[in-house]
Amino acid sequence: MRRLRGLWKIIFGRTTILVLLLFIQVMILFGGFMILDRQILVFNYMCGFLAVIILMYLLNVRQNSSFKLMWIIFILAVPVAGVTFYIYTRLQPGTRFISRRVRELVEEERPFLLPDRAMMEKVYETSKPEAGLFRYIHDKGKYPAYGNASIKYFPLGEDKFKEMIYQLERARDFIFLEYFIVERGHMWNTILDILVRKAREGVEVRFMYDGTCTLSLLPKNYNRRMEALGIKCKIFSPMMPFLATHQNNRDHRKILVIDGHTAFTGGVNLADEYINEKVRFGHWKDTAIMVKGKAVNNFTLMFLQMWNIEEKRKENYGRYMYTGEERYDASMRNGGYVVPYGDSPFDGENVGENVYLDILNTANEYVHIMTPYLILDEELLNAITFAAQRGVDVKIILPHIPDKKYAYWLARTHYKELITEGVRLYEYTPGFIHAKVFTSDDEKAVVGTINLDFRSLYLHFECAAYIWKNPVIGDIENDFQMTLEKCQKVTMENCNQYNIIYRIIGRALRLIAPLM
């Protein structure tokens, strides 16, 4: 009986119905234009003319080459459908609205994100390349760097969760939460109890979760339940049964801000598998950081930017900015610099990827990476292999038990090429790696939400913190080395033994890698 109920839920659940409706719309569009193509000669010629115009545009526009190639193949293979879908994706009102609102909100926040000129001059005197990267992140990503950084690193989701509870209990003014995945269970229920209590005490609580949660993780109208509990709540881009490209641009950020002086980010979402209360793919290895002081302003404004996309009321940004003294805590690593930054699919700049590229291109001794996915474009692939070719120790830790089989098959298509060029690959034997971590030369690190895949680098809203010369980098690198002891090295022999069917599937999937 329980199995029948489960099967009934799958067949008639929200996710199944949504996917079915979207599939029907695609088939109607596809079929309709194929019929027109066969029956109306003028329409056929018109599509051919438009295909040439679009191909000329694609060859000249500044865009990632993998996306260009995908569209070119689609348009050449099926001109009518290719032209139709390309034009359709460029005329989406939802996408244009979000893009315009993000630009407007960035301008509203600009006065609160001014760089410290004296600090920048000091960085310039110490290292011109670092000053250049700081300037780039501010000019293109809109987020300034901060000195006297205070940072704490959490090598597991359980460690972050424990600290989150402690910091949430101390909240006095406001709490902002922005998460990609939220699911009821021990972790979320514990946090929710605190949020409800804090809201009753007069603390302003704002909670935002991505619309993918509405498919199966959270009940329908869960945001209204939160409002009834005194928590201001929003769903970012709820999943709808209509073909719309903006539904491809998810809010993948994980941000918690408390009273403007404490912030968390990293790979850890608000669900039990992230703290190993629930086993899904073996042991779940994830990481996070806590930042304190004025650098938290960057995270605060990232949150308010997303919160206000559909708001008409003007935000009182100054009310939430931290203007006090830097907070030093004996349990944290103090010193050096930190740049919390966000990445948007609508700003025309791939800040997340470019920070990774800068680390790879300027490394002298090593670059060590933990990532759940390895779906690379040519730029990243070339940067990783070139770093190894010039003698940099490049090591990448990946999952041994994947959460998405197709991503695993795709990642393995890069293995032979990387190993041949001297990159050393490892798989985390106990289970799944969800961490997004870079360390380099004992003086640089990135911890955040940005995976090495197309969706994170180009399609999603993301966030991270670039860290330079702070002692916490030693903690991050030490965690990498300890994690390495639990990994198995991937050899060329392993690659040759890999199932031929999966290898073929992986190669085929590279045609649509920009969608994955």
Image (cartoon, rainbow, N blue to C red):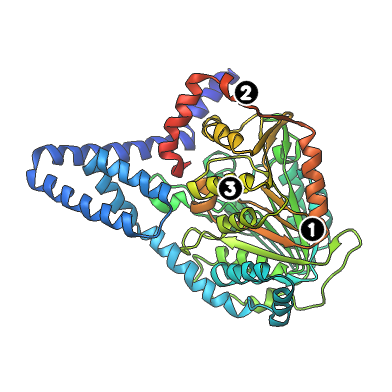
Marks 3 and 2 sit apart, C-alpha to C-alpha, by 23 Å
Marks 3 and 1 sit apart, C-alpha to C-alpha, by 44 Å
Quarter containing the N terminus = top right
| Residue 287 in sight in this render | yes
The tally of labels here is 3
Q: Amino acid at mark 3?
A: Phe
Q: Is residue 473 above or below residue 215?
A: below
Q: Which mark is residue 386?
A: 3
516 vs 255, nearest the viewer: 516
Q: Which mark is residue 168?
A: 1
Q: Which mark is residue 494?
A: 2
Nearer the viewer's eye, disc 3 or disc 1?
A: 3
344 vs 228, nearest the viewer: 344
* Secondary structure category for the residue under label 1: helix
Q: Amino acid at mark 2?
A: Asn
Q: Is residue 142 above or below residue 373?
A: below
Nearer the viewer's eye, disc 2 or disc 1?
A: 2
Q: Earlier in the sequence, mark 2 or mark 1?
A: 1
Q: Earlier in the sequence, mark 3 or mark 1?
A: 1
Q: Is residue 157 above or below residue 118?
A: above
Name the residue: 62% across, 70% down: 132
| Residue 154 in sight in this render | no
* Secondary structure category for the residue under label 2: helix
View extreme (right): residue: 330
Q: Earlier in the sequence, mark 3 or mark 2?
A: 3
Percent position (x, y) of residue 260?
73, 69
Check whether the beta carbons of the residues at disc 3 and disc 1 lie within 8 A of each other.
no
Nearer the viewer's eye, disc 3 or disc 2?
A: 3
